[in-house]
Image (cartoon, grey):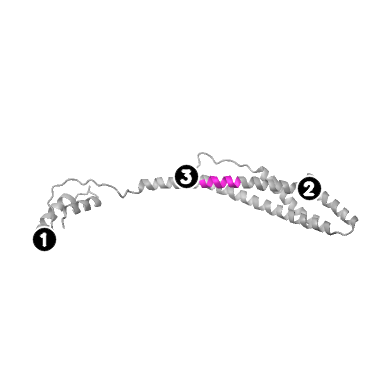
């Protein structure tokens, strides 16, 4: 039974050793100062994916090794004959203890999980900060292009007759208004409408 358990340790152990080497070789750089906010955001999103991938894989290896270790320990404790139990405990110590043992590897794996989690949290904070910066930038840009609803339009002072609703005066009013306001290409539609309302007294 113990030979089967020892064999089941090996793939997870090798994978964890490989992942720990990869984590130790990870370069945690800052984005270039010349990058735009969008480029920095992409930079951090890619980093977050890499960190999450390594984190999940290491957690899987740690969980697998802990599960196998628990099964082996339980199996060892259930052995009835003293001699057989001592043999199994000796094998267990050989595999689990020492610099190359499973306990040391599990410890290193858990430390790597802590380190990766800290880096991921830092990336999350940077992404939140960039999101705020992007929102502020968009708000400022929108403010440049959004006209204020409280715009005061200074209407030019024209000496035009007002129209009070008398149909006989309409032709005279419209001729004057059309010549002074409506045909002016420099006046905006809003300005023309404002002048029209000012001189139309209905």
In this rendering, the count of numbered labels is 3
Location of mark 3 (residue): 133
Location of mark 1 (residue): 167
The residue that appears at 13% across and 57% down in the rendered structure is: 164
Q: Name above or below for residue 18 compared with residue 167.
A: above
The spot of residue 54 in percent (x, y) is 65, 50
Question: Marks 1 and 3, Cα distance to the nearest angstrom?
Answer: 60 Å
Question: Marks 1 and 2, Cα distance to the nearest angstrom?
Answer: 105 Å
Count residues near mark 2 (Cα–Cα under 10 Å), then give few for <14, some for 14-19, many for 20+.
some
Count residues near mark 3 (Cα–Cα under 10 Å), then give few for <14, some for 14-19, many for 20+.
few
Please name whichever residue, 156 or 25, is drawn nearer the observer in this view of the structure: 156
Decide which of tag 1 and tag 2 comes sooner along the chain: 2
- In this view, which residue lies farthest toward the top? 33
The spot of residue 184 in percent (x, y) is 19, 49
Q: The N terminus is located in which quarter? A: bottom right
Q: Is residue 181 magenta?
A: no
The spot of residue 198 in percent (x, y) is 18, 52
Q: The C terminus is located in which quarter? A: bottom left
Question: Marks 2 and 3, Cα distance to the nearest angstrom?
Answer: 48 Å
Location of mark 2 (residue): 101
Q: Where are the magenta residues, as a range? A: 119-128
Q: Secondary structure at mark 3?
A: helix
Residue 1 shows in this picture: no
Q: Is residue 125 magenta?
A: yes
Q: Secondary structure at mark 2?
A: loop
Residue 193 shows in this picture: yes
């Amino acid at each position: 039974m113990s030979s089967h358990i020892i064999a089941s340790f090996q793939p997870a152990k090798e994978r964890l050793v490989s992942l720990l080497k990869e984590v130790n070789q990870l370069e945690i750089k800052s984005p270039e100062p010349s990058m735009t906010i969008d480029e920095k955001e992409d930079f951090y999103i890619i980093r977050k994916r890499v960190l999450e991938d390594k984190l999940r894989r290491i957690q899987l290896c740690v969980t697998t090794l802990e599960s196998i270790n628990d099964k082996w320990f339980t199996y060892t404790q259930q052995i009835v004959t003293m001699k057989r139990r001592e043999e199994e405990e000796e094998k267990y110590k050989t595999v689990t203890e020492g610099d190359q043992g499973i306990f040391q590897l599990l410890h290193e794996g858990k430390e790597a999980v802590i380190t990766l989690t800290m880096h991921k949290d830092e990336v999350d904070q940077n992404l939140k900060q960039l999101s705020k910066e992007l929102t502020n930038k968009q708000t400022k840009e929108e403010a440049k292009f959004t006209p204020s609803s409280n715009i005061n339009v200074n209407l030019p002072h024209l000496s035009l007759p007002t129209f009070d609703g008398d149909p006989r005066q309409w032709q005279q009013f419209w001729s004057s208004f059309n010549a002074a306001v409506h045909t002016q290409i420099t006046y905006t539609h809003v300005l023309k409408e404002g002048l029209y309302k000012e001189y139309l007294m209905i």
